[in-house]
Image (tube, rainbow, N blue to C red):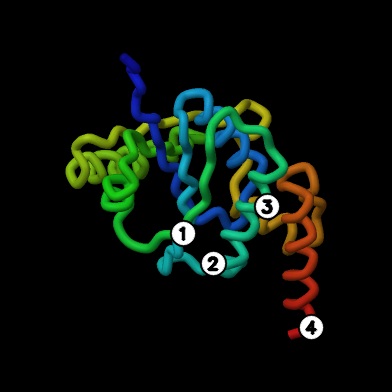
Amino acid sequence: MSTKTKPKRAIYPGTFDPVTNGHLSLMERACHLFDELIVAVATNASKAPMFEYDERLRMLKESIKTNKFACKIQVIGFDGLLAELAKKEKSVAIIRGLRALTDFEYEFQMALMNRKLARDVETVFMMPSLSWVYLSSTLVKDVARNGGDVSELVPSHVVEMFKQKVKTKKKK
């Protein structure tokens, strides 16, 4: 008799504006814990993203193509409650990255609310690799907007997308 187990699925949500090497590192590490990882790109109307929603989805899909992860990864978009998405996708966990102590309070509140809304879904806090602990999408955008080199911080196709964005903004 076969004892086939259901794959363990986790969701890694974010705005990913843009996806960074830190995000990719966290995905790679999450794949060592879970069989499947859903990377959920939030529309996030409360933020004013530099990249459009479709661009962020495309960025992530391109980024995971060039990496060899230890689990199956799927990129999807979402709008609404993360807890509802986690239940719908039958996820056992939500992956959240913590770079510094300052991230913890907000993330802790979100984890408690998600637990209230989806009791069977755990939040797993992961710290980035030491080489990416300082990295955030906000810092990367600031460096790029001011003409700095972001080639060691993001995948190469994202560098090209930055060049297009900055060029377009200068024309306006």
Q: Give how far across and how far down residue 86 sits, in percent.
A: 32, 46
Residue 166 lies left or right of residue 28; in this view the side is right
N-terminal label among 4 and 1: 1
Label 2 crowding class (10 Å Cα cut-off): few <14, some 14-19, many 20+?
some
Identity of the residue drawn at 19% across and 37% down: 119
For marks 1 and 2, give the one nearer the viewer.
1
Where residue 145 sits, quadrant-wise, is: bottom right
The secondary structure type at the circle numbered 4 is helix
Residue 35 lies left or right of residue 115; in this view the side is right
Instruction: Kindly check if marks 3 and 1 are in contact, taking CB atoms under 8 A apart as contact.
Output: no
Location of mark 3 (residue): 62
Q: Quadrant of the N terminus?
A: top left
The secondary structure type at the circle numbered 3 is helix
Instruction: Kindly check if marks 1 and 2 are in contact, taking CB atoms under 8 A apart as contact.
Output: yes
Say which of 68 and 100 sits in front: 68
For marks 3 and 2, give the one nearer the viewer.
3
Location of mark 4 (residue): 171
The secondary structure type at the circle numbered 1 is strand
- Measure the alpha-carbon separation of dots 3 and 1: 15 Å
Amino acid type for the residue under numbered disc 1:
Gly
The secondary structure type at the circle numbered 2 is helix
- Measure the alpha-carbon separation of dots 4 and 1: 30 Å
Location of mark 1 (residue): 77
- Measure the alpha-carbon separation of dots 1 and 2: 8 Å
Amino acid type for the residue under numbered disc 4:
Lys
Identity of the residue drawn at 62% across and 52% down: 61
Amino acid type for the residue under numbered disc 3:
Glu
Mark number, residue 53: 2
115 is higher (above) or lower (below) than 159: above
Instruction: Kindly check if marks 2 and 4 are in contact, taking CB atoms under 8 A apart as contact.
Output: no
